[in-house]
Image (cartoon, rainbow, N blue to C red):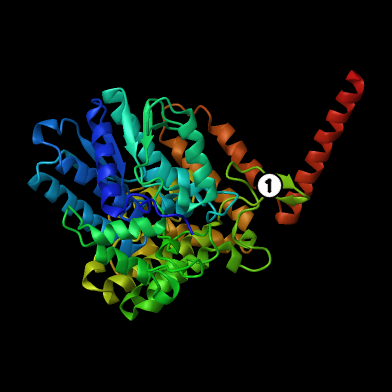
Amino acid sequence: MSKSAFKKTGFRKSVQSLIKQVQEIYLADDIPWVVGYSGGKDSTAALQLVWMALADLPKKKRHKIVHVITNDTLVENPIVALWVNRSLKQIETAAEAQSLPVKPHKLEPVINDTFWVKMLGWGYPAPRPKFRWCTSRLKIDPTSRFIQRVVSTNGEAIVVLGTRKAESSARAHVMEKHAQKSTRTHLSEHTSLTNAWIYPPIGDWSNDDVWTFLMQIDNPWGYDNKDLLTMYQGATEGGECPLVIDTNTQSCGNSRFGCWTCTLVDKDRSMEAMILNDEEKEWMLPLLELRNAMDFRTMGERGDRNVRDFRRMHGKVQIFNGEPIPGPYIQSFRENLLRLLLQAQQWIRANGPEEVRSIDLITLAELRKIREIWVTEKHEIEDSLPHIYEEVTGESFPDAKRFDLAGLGYEEMQLLKECCGDDEIHYQMVRELLHTEKEFSLMTKRTGLFKKLEKAIERSFFEDLEDAKQYALEKKKSTDDIQSIVQAASS
């Protein structure tokens, strides 16, 4: 168990000393602050310290803005998302009432980087430890863009984080390493953003210190920290937290809130615990079931290979250890995932509590982008998304006739598919050739048409997976032989 930061001087004196430190750093210059706020216990404690420090200063000394930023990945645990959204509104109202220069911001990924656009649109496989494509796009990039804007406007920025050394040995090592390199007291340089400084006010606190602080001192923007404790308790197996009395006691610190779609871990234990601990949260069961359906660990011995194309995103077949490297999800799997997602959304809206009756598990903007990718980039001119949407929701999809496919649509493609029988690759090639010709027919100059037609044929001239595998192996052998000859000639 980590040692308490309050043990030496006592709780009250330790907190007052830290508030004074926050004030000194705040008053030292005109550099604006950016406070990272997730709604969890650590970021709440860090923001609460900053808030208390500002409130203790005379109004004339509150000379620079404090931006409070929250990352909405659009796939956050709905309970946490509701908590954070209400909290941000409360922060804005309370800051104005208390004349504090605190401004909340909710950040989102750009439309082409959202979880569902990447997975359902482009066919990215569910995240896994060796392919964590989600972290940078959903979390790091939106935050970095905001901080860069602050830096470009003001020259520098101080980023306040609720990171703690006690979270893990790796986190402690990183924090200590950067602290040693720092040229400013209590601040360290951001690892990737120029002219951005990191300030972790609760860096030396233990998990118990955080809860002691939150339970002993009222939340200054009017939220109830006891409700936060209840949320953590509900997400902890057995509901035990946070009165830790020995190293064997379960702590609320083990409750990790995050994206409900996350497949980086084998199980979403926090959501499972929420459902088990509170029957009123059973409305989240469809989310848990969908998350498990996306997890490659649940798909048998071959994982998700059976639902992924044997060609990479660019259409090439690449071999590793004698087998094709799997590419994006195939069309039928993406369509089925979308159907399951919309069904879960409909069910929650109909059966969930009042606060989730208008929940968007996927936004209309994402659906439009996915449809655009399917039709214009993947040449899936069946344009099946509006049909799936209407099938599940009973409502017409907005802009249903957006694409002018000149008679090539859902019904026509179903007929073509029947003609091709079980030859899916042949069907895909003919479909792409038809769509490519249609695209170029609308252009004044048709330069590049033959090149695109040639690429479409190259992507689909295989008979099946085995044929593609043999072709790739022969091509690799030929390349290796040429390299061997060149090396022998030059030696």
**Residue at point 60%, 56% (across, down):** 308
**Residue at point 41%, 51% (across, down):** 370
- Relative to residue 454, is residue 407 drawn left or right? left
Up-down relation of residue 144 to residue 88 (above or below)? above
- Where residue 479 appears, as percent x and y from the top left, is 80, 34
Front position in the image: 94 or 489: 94
- Where residue 199 appears, as percent x and y from the top left, is 36, 37
Q: In terms of image quadrants, where is residue 279?
A: bottom left
Q: Residues within 10 Å of mark 1 (few under 14, many from 20)?
A: few
Front position in the image: 240 or 408: 240
- Relative to residue 289, is residue 233 drawn left or right? left
- Element under label 1? loop
Identity of the amino acid at label 1?
A: Phe
Up-down relation of residue 101 to residue 411 (above or below)? above
- Where residue 42 appears, as percent x and y from the top left, is 35, 52
Identify the residue under disc 1: 461
Up-down relation of residue 246 to residue 331 (above or below)? below
